[in-house]
Image: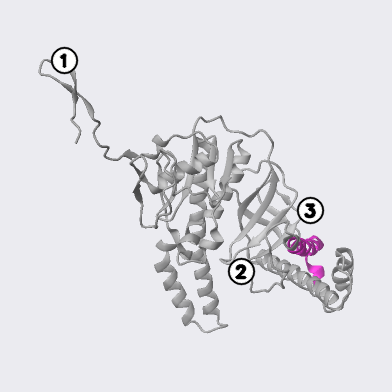
């Protein structure tokens, strides 16, 4: 399988200028190609091929005075920009055919976009120097903060600048097969929530960190400062950068939490079952901010790829499975319950159930995992005494006491 590794870059002043020029040239070629295809579509002409666009918008454009500055950047960057447009069109058409989730038609890029990127392939002759720097064409040797070792030498590198003004080098590398963890004996079902981020079928409850909620005071203050700045001023640009950095801190903390928790769950369990949540639907309710703050989709994606990488089993059950309505002790469906009901008593067997743990056990059972209700920390309710009970005399001899009927 292929994995993406990102490392922080620290370009100096001239290198930042060179990268900004590369971002701008790639954006112009992308927009020119999109405009050419949209013009041909409006005129009823056939779809313009990538080869024709490359000849017209790169090779010939460099010879004109209007686009002569395209020669100042690597030609690979411009070619990859055309490939990105092809990918955008392919995703759009596949969405219309039902092969993947629907996406919008390709749109023009702006120099004010929060995220800008360029990609270098092996033809660009980029390399990692012996000193650990990243050597890029037209930019020189850029300092990299290596947090770990790459499992293999990648063929491409993508340089990304995010909204907070940070630079990253993104590598896509293939991992060798057979990289599995020692076999574990436990299997677990997971029920995701808001008050608790995750509830496991063994009774473990993991508190929700609520990174966005905790940072709201700081974000509000920075947003107010941004609103006071005059549009187009340098102070407004600086304030916008502070807001972006505050949001980046929240996103980084959430991502780190997801990585640590997903790695722990995959390492301790041989099989993991989750519920396929309708996150987009929940994000349109009054709980939208809390749903986005939890980041369920990103967490489940991490669980899925880590399970595939380390030889674990990952199962998604249908979102319409009544996990919160079925008693995990006797299996009787007791009907829907409002959200404020966190503990309920089964009308059939009298077991008192924790709503979240009961749902996690049912998630695991629906996925076919071997879990028991004892892990749900259920406790039986009060059961009427039987008509015959065991009793003792003073001499210690057992006897049976008959309880007369009504």
Element type where label 3 sits in the image: loop
Q: In which quarter of the image is the C terminus?
A: top left
Residue 92 or residue 235, whichever sits in front: 92
Apparent side of residue 137 relative to residue 215 in the rendered image (left or right): right
Circles 1 and 2 in contact, beta carbons < 8 Å: no
Observer-side mark, 1 or 3, equals: 1
The answer to whether one can see residue 111 in this image is yes
Earlier in the chain: of badge 1 and badge 2, it is: 2
Labels 3 and 2 touching (C-beta < 8 A): no
Q: Which residue lies furthest to the bottom in this view?
A: 230
First in sequence, mark 3 or 2: give its number: 2
Measuring from the top left, give residue 287's x and y in whole percent: 45, 64
Pointer 3 residue: 125
| 105 w.r.t. 349: above or below | below
Q: Give yes or no for residue 82 being in the magenta stretch.
A: yes
State the image quarter where residue 32 is shown: bottom right
The CA distance from mark 3 to mark 2 is 28 Å
Q: Dot 2, crowdedness within 10 Å: few (<14), some or many (≥20)?
A: few
Q: Which residue lies furthest to the front in this view?
A: 406
Badge 3 local density, few (<14 within 10 Å), some, or many (20+)? few
Please tell me the numbered disc located at residue 397.
Answer: 1
Identify the residue under disc 2: 114
Nearer the observer, 125 or 159: 159
Kind of element beneath mark 2: loop
Q: Is residue 29 magenta?
A: no
Please name the residue shown 85% across and 75% down the image.
40
């Amino acid at each position: 399988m292929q994995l993406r590794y990102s490392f922080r870059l620290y370009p100096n002043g001239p290198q930042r200028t060179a990268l900004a020029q590369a971002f701008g040239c790639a954006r112009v070629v992308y927009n020119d190609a999109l405009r050419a295809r949209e013009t041909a579509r409006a005129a009823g002409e056939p779809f313009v091929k990538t080869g024709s666009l490359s000849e017209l918008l790169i090779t010939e454009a460099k010879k004109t005075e209007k686009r002569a500055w395209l020669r100042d950047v690597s030609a690979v960057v411009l070619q990859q920009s055309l490939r990105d447009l092809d990918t955008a069109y392919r995703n759009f058409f596949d969405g219309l055919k039902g092969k993947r989730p629907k996406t919008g038609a390709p749109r023009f890029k702006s120099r004010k976009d929060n995220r800008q990127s360029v990609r270098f392939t092996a033809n660009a002759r980029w390399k990692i120097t012996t000193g650990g720097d990243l050597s890029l064409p037209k930019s020189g040797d850029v300092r990299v903060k290596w947090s770990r070792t790459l499992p293999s030498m990648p063929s491409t590198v993508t340089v990304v600048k995010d909204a907070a003004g940070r630079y990253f080098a993104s590598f896509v590398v293939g991992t060798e097969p057979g990289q599995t963890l020692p076999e574990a004996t436990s299997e677990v079902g997971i029920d995701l929530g808001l008050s608790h981020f995750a509830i496991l079928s063994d009774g473990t409850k993991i508190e929700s960190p609520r990174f966005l909620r905790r940072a709201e005071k700081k974000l509000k203050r920075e947003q107010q400062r941004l609103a006071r700045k005059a549009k187009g001023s340098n102070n407004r640009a600086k304030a916008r950068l502070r807001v972006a950095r505050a949001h980046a801190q929240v996103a980084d903390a959430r991502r780190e939490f997801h990585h640590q928790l997903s790695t722990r769950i995959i390492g301790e369990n041989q099989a993991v079952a989750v519920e396929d949540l309708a996150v987009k639907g929940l994000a349109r309710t009054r709980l939208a901010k809390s749903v986005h703050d939890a980041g369920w989709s990103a967490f489940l994606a991490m669980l899925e790829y880590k399970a595939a990488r380390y030889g674990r089993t990952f199962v998604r059950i249908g979102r319409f499975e009544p996990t919160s309505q079925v008693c995990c002790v006797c299996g009787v469906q007791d009907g829907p319950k409002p959200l404020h009901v966190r503990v309920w008593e089964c009308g059939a067997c009298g077991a008192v159930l924790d709503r979240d743990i009961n749902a996690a056990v049912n998630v695991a059972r629906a996925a076919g995992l071997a879990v028991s209700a004892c892990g749900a920390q259920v406790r039986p309710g009060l059961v009427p005494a039987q008509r015959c009970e065991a009793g003792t005399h003073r001499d210690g001899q057992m006897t049976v006491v008959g309880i007369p009927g009504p």
